[in-house]
Amino acid sequence: MLIWPAIFTLLLKCTTAKILFEILTQPDEYELANRLKESLERDEQNRVEFSHETGKWGHWTLFQSISRLSKSVSEHSANWLVIVEPYSLVDQQKLCEFLGNEDSTKAMIFGYALRDEGPTIIHHYHHTPTGPQLPYPDFGAGLAISAALLKRLADELQQNPYADNFAIDAKHEFAKYLKERLGIEMEHRPHDFCLFPTDGCAVSFNAPKYSQEKALDAKDIYAAVKTYSEYHRTRVVAVKRTWGIRLPFIDYFSDAEDAFVPTKTLGIPNTKRGHCAKTLAILRYYAKNVESYPNNKWLLIADDDTLLSTPRLLRLLGERDHMKKMIIGERYGFSYSADGSGGYDYPTGGSGMIFSKPAALQLAGNCECPSDDSPDDMIIGVCARSFNIPIIHSSSFHQARSTDYAKDYIARQPPISFHKFEDLSPYDEYTKYLHEETGPTSTVHSEL
């Protein structure tokens, strides 16, 4: 079973700070989030809201929620907004003491500051030429925003809505907007807002711990790897020597038949980008042949330069209800409207897309590609929205290389995937971040 994090409670009413808590929630985390909410509301002054219950697309980016949160703070006469995640630990006594010593009538924001070491693709290569890089929060470690700053931010967003069509890394995008529009940076308070459970912290992140006893059998997953004939003896070999060897039901879908791999072809020509036709063909192949895989529960679609930790994936999926329609991976977003009525979530293809069997079957029977090279993950997002299939985010999945993320962020939670390894050794990357001795393996391919 999922090991619940311990939740610190406050037995006495906080008299120095009145707090509105926003828990960044998802549909499959309700039980955990509700336990945290019940604990926080033992102090009757506190108010707790779940972000996903607003029904707004892009609620997880904060931009669609700031106006609502500013109104809630005002209505409940709160003087602080504190952003947390379902896996956050909150010591309310410590938080009360910390915020009680700060002036909420001034524009103030506190948290644990992550910083990039240099330009990175996930942050659109944003880089400060001199001095330290932009500090951005880890929501799991908590983010405290004064009522005064929240009001300024709500007013600014009303006049100048966040305009980027893509939502990639919400915490960095939020910090960048705050810096560029209001000239304010988050203050780093690592002894009060912590990435790991630590005595004395007001808020800390406690990474999910999934039980080995409930881990899936490797035979419960059918894996499909998208590849191209040029990479059969490079990328594919790396996949087969690392995580692919642990999955007995895995196929490599290419533009050409190759007995060395071996590959499957579905009559789809290779495209330089997008790969929508290939991904949809894989979904339909799975739907047609799923009964050939006894006890199948999940479909994994990955790129040939995706690296995965199979044991961790099996433990994570063991905690999910495979009978419900869902897609699991790293969630991005596109074209969210200011009021949260437009736009959609989508699973990043490079980090690995995990479909429950019911979700895969529905998408296979109802989705279409505008063109062969349309972006497959985004088209899946559009189609998933049409059928109310949620994109469940896990921060263990990564669309880029380990070097593209802040080191502290990578260390906070065991990763399940990374993507792209042209400029590094896939074996070093896999060994350092993803390999575990435990977990099922299948027969080693003789050609390796």
Image (cartoon, grey):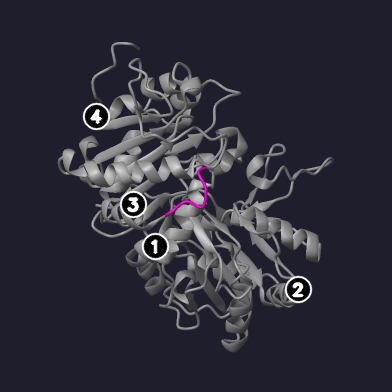
Q: Is mark 2 on a helix, strand or loop?
A: helix
Q: Nearer the viewer, mark 3 or mark 1?
A: 3
Residue shown at 50%/20% (left/top)? 230
Q: Is mark 4 on a helix, strand or loop?
A: loop
Residue in the picture at 50% in, 79% down = 46
Q: Mark 3 points at which residue?
A: 364
Q: Residue at x 35, y 12 (%)?
A: 448
Closer to the chain start, of discs 2 and 3, is 2
Magenta residues, start to end: 368-372
Q: Does the magenta stretch include residue 14?
A: no
Calculate the distance from the C-alpha at mark 2 to the C-alpha at mark 3.
43 Å
Q: Which of marks 4 and 1 is nearer the N terminus?
A: 1
**Residue 156: mark in rendering:** 2
Quarter of the image where one finds residue 182: bottom right
User: Closer to us: mark 4 or mark 1?
Assistant: 4
Q: Under tag 3, what secondary structure?
A: helix
Whole-percent x, y for residue 268 in the image: 43, 36
Amino acid found under the numbered disc labelled 1: Ile
Foreground tag (2 vs 4) = 4
Task: In this rendered view, identify the residue nearer to me: 423 or 282.
Answer: 282
Residue 302 x, y percent position in the rendering: 42, 37
* Furthest residue in direction right, as rendered: 130
Residue 105 seen? no
The numbered mark, 3 or 1, whose residue comes first in the sequence reads: 1
Which residue type does callout 2 highlight? Glu
Q: Which residue in the structure is indicated by mark 1? A: 7
Rounded to the nearest whole Å, what is the CA distance between mark 4 and mark 3?
23 Å
- Alpha-carbon distance for marks 3 and 1? 42 Å
